[in-house]
Amino acid sequence: MKTKITQMLGIQYPVFQGAMAWIADAELAAAVSNAGGLGIIAGGAAPVTVVQQEIRRAKELTDQPFAVNIMLLNPTADALAQLVIDEGVPVVTTGAGSPAKYIKQWKQAGIKVIPVVASTAYARRMERMGVDAVIAEGMESGGHIGETTTMALLPQVIDSVDIPVVAAGGIADGRGLAAARLFGAEGVQCGTIFLSAKECNISEQYKQMIYKANDISTVVTGRASGHPVRSLKSPLSRKLVQMEGHIETRTLEEIEAMTAGSLRKAVQDGNYEEGTFMSGQIAGLVKDNSDCKTIIETMVHEAEILLRNAPSRIG
Ligand code: TUI
């Protein structure tokens, strides 16, 4: 499946593995890149030296292109912006804010720059700044999200810019990829489906919660603090929903204390009571423990069949 994105990045399949903080390490990213997709190392809130090690490990594990994601709320974003240049990382994605101040230096270094956007205004702003493509991420996604669904956001972003658009949010199989292609997207980015990959190093508790999830298993918390986050319903997210129902200043501080470090508790410790198990709404589709190659090849194969048979749907 050749698209403008596979050609731009020199990859085989138009499938990105979303950058998941604490989760998307060199092993996962390299497995996705070796399978023909675009693996992405999550900078997250990790110290610069840790991200540097992951980049170097990814270079050992794959000779295919991979990306690093810079989460712009992260205080080390400036240092990571320089690190990707120093390490010769070919592709950078960004999330949770504006990468405006880095774009010139990244483009000068020959890096392909692909920000996540959650609105058309922001997509247009990014295009004017000279980015290579955008990822339009709907609120079905796990983690930090915008307000608009993929179904509504994607065609509007595609109509707003001339650069390639990658669809994200609620995509986990060939149907999602085929639909995104019909919308006019040049590729997809998936996070939740890769939580089930053998190469994804998360706690067994997290994996089991994903396998057991259905269509109504996630909830959005954090709207009061301005950083809405989608995660699986759990003891912590239920408590947060309750507290957010009657917010005072003290509650915001309590919420901050309860959520700090809670993603790490989910990923590494499998702490059911105190963890934040970030997940997209598509978790109900994620059932078995597969590897990245099978996940990507199955998705692309299914999409190709659907797209080939599309005329039969006219009737
Ligand atoms: O960044 C994400 N998803 C994430 S980051 C993350 S780590 C985290 N941990 C604890 C609390 C909060 C985050 C987990 N998941 N996705 C990309 C994304 N970017 N979604 C939405 C946006 C976005 C929102 C506003 C991008 C740009 C934007 O611009 C606002 C403006 O106009 O500056």
Image (tube, rainbow, N blue to C red):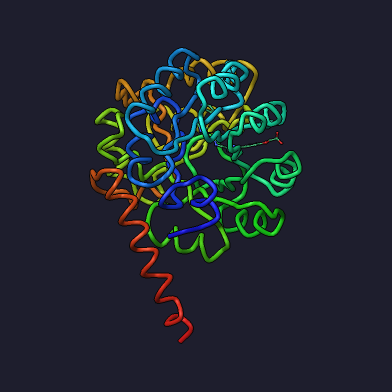
Residue 245 seen from this side: yes
Q: Quadrant of residue 193?
A: top left
x and y, in percent, of residue 138 in the image: 56, 48
The answer to whether residue 264 is left or right of residue 122 is: left
x and y, in percent, of residue 150 in the image: 56, 53
The residue under the point 58% across, 62% down is: 184
- Picture quadrant of ligand 1: top right
The answer to whether residue 314 is left or right of residue 64 is: right
Residue toward you, 27 or 107: 107
Q: Quadrant of residue 212?
A: top left
Residue toward you, 92 or 95: 92
Q: Quadrant of residue 33?
A: top left
Q: How many marks?
A: 0
The residue under the point 44% across, 38% down is: 65
The answer to whether residue 195 is left or right of residue 121 is: left
Viewport quadrant of the N terminus: bottom left
Viewport quadrant of the C terminus: bottom left
Residue 251 seen from this side: no
x and y, in percent, of residue 43 in the image: 49, 24
The answer to whether residue 35 is left or right of residue 51 is: left
x and y, in percent, of residue 314 in the image: 48, 83
